[in-house]
Image: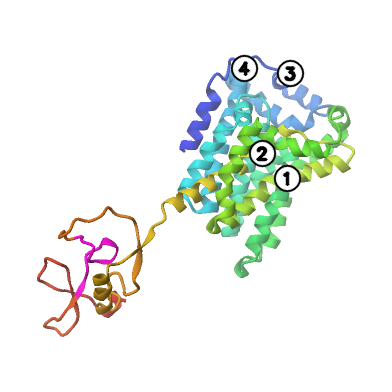
Amino acid sequence: MAPGLVALAVGLAGIGVPELWRDEVSSWSAAGRPLRGLFAMLANVDASNGASYVLLHAWTGLFGDSPAALRLPSALAIAGAACFTALIARRMFASPVAGLAGGLLLATVPQISRYAQEARAYAVVACAVAAATWLLLRALERPTADRWAWYALATGVAGVFHLVSLACLVGQLPMVAAAALRPDARRVLRQWPLAVAAGVAPALPVMALGRLQSGRQLSWLAAPTVRDLRFVWQDLFGSHQVLYAFLAMALPALLLRGSRRPAALLLLAASLPVGAVWVVSRLGSTSFFLARYLLFTVPLWAALAGGGIGALAALLGRPVPVRRAPAAGAAGAAGGGGGGGGGGCCWWPRRPPSRPGSAWSTSGCCGRPPRTPTPTTAGRPGWLRPGTRRATHWSRSAAT
């Protein structure tokens, strides 16, 4: 919840101050039409934004058409995207720290806060793709029909609101392939294509109309060059400084052994859609390569950076091996491995140096009190803590 609340606060700050710009005026004009006039317009132009216009038409009927009211759905969508980003990072890296960091980092991206205050579809698409990614992870973990249905629904919402967002499927393919390597999960290779087909189906009419209108609407976009591919990353984040900061935060997750695999999958999920759109725009007759069309990849970058912070926190908080005093080794050997064992040292969180003569003196393993075997009347070995006279009996199963 915390990442969502922070992202919502960032999105609401001054949301009604800027005047509507050209694209937002188009949203305002379309949303103010009656439904019959709106659908007649979409049959000729802007069909790819039709879902956004229909949503705003219903929204403005309830809350008015002021700049703040028009932009509020985008702010709410970015708050949802931050929540799903946190869920993705937490599930991928099995770390609450990674989840919290990833969700909060998303709110710091300048382009995210910008489109949280814009009456267009890009924030809704970012939320839908983040939701679809998290729902895919749940379906891959336990592939049941209801989990695949939710994933298909989120994918369908993303595709209907903006067709370019379906490029996220290219980035999700490595996740599916990695999950299919488990012998008990190979059926996902059959289930995932069916869920994708169900999710893409609602977008097919939009795709057909958009194909007819693309020449009029996207003719101003030239075929992308290698230079465009090189600099689109900083356009996604708003500046090259923010991009480099996110890369630096993601580096521990990519290098440390415990987080390397999920970090690589997230890196592919965030970068492959950009490369796919670049290739299609480069080779096809129409270009779709524009940074705001690819905003849906930013939550995945934030999840990756959150994973890096989580991995670094785990590394810094990892206990260190501490050598035992010789007396403790003898006690451990006499105890047959009880307490600290006879291995010379054990893993234990750091603790302050103990005072001589205290119950927690260094005569025990890693600062713990030694346990010495004492004979008992029952003929079973017992363990006697320093300063006590009664031995505690352990059964064989408990001792092991």
Give the image quarter of residue 81.
Answer: top right
Secondary structure, mark 3, is helix
* Mark 4 Cα-neighbour bin, 10 Å: few <14, some 14–19, many ≥20: many
Q: Amino acid at mark 4?
A: Pro
Point out residue 162 in the picture as x, y percentages from the top left corner: 73, 36
Which residue is rendered at x = 75% and y = 41% of the image? 203
Given residues 86 and 159, the one toward you in this image is: 86
Most extreme residue toward the left is 389
- Residue named by callout 4: 67
Secondary structure, mark 1, is helix
Earlier in the chain: of badge 4 and badge 1, it is 4
Q: Amino acid at mark 1?
A: Pro
Earlier in the chain: of badge 3 and badge 1, it is 3
The reply to whether dot 3 and dot 1 touch (C-beta < 8 Å) is: no
In the displayed structure, 385 sits above or below 279; it is: below
Most extreme residue toward the front is 326
Which residue is rendered at x = 66% and y = 58% of the image? 176
Point out residue 28 in the picture as x, y percentages from the top left corner: 69, 19
- Residue named by callout 3: 22
Instruction: Tell me the magenta residue range.
Output: 360-372
- Residue named by callout 2: 296
Give the image quarter of residue 241.
Answer: top right
The reply to whether dot 2 and dot 4 touch (C-beta < 8 Å) is: no
Which residue is rendered at x = 65% and y = 45% of the image? 153
The reply to whether dot 4 and dot 1 touch (C-beta < 8 Å) is: no
Given residues 259 and 208, the one toward you in this image is: 259
Secondary structure, mark 2, is helix
* Mark 1 Cα-neighbour bin, 10 Å: few <14, some 14–19, many ≥20: many
Residue 198 visible within the image: no
Tell me, for residue 273, which label it has, or none. 1
Q: Amino acid at mark 2?
A: Phe
Taking the image as shown, residue 144 lies to the left or right of residue 159, namely: left
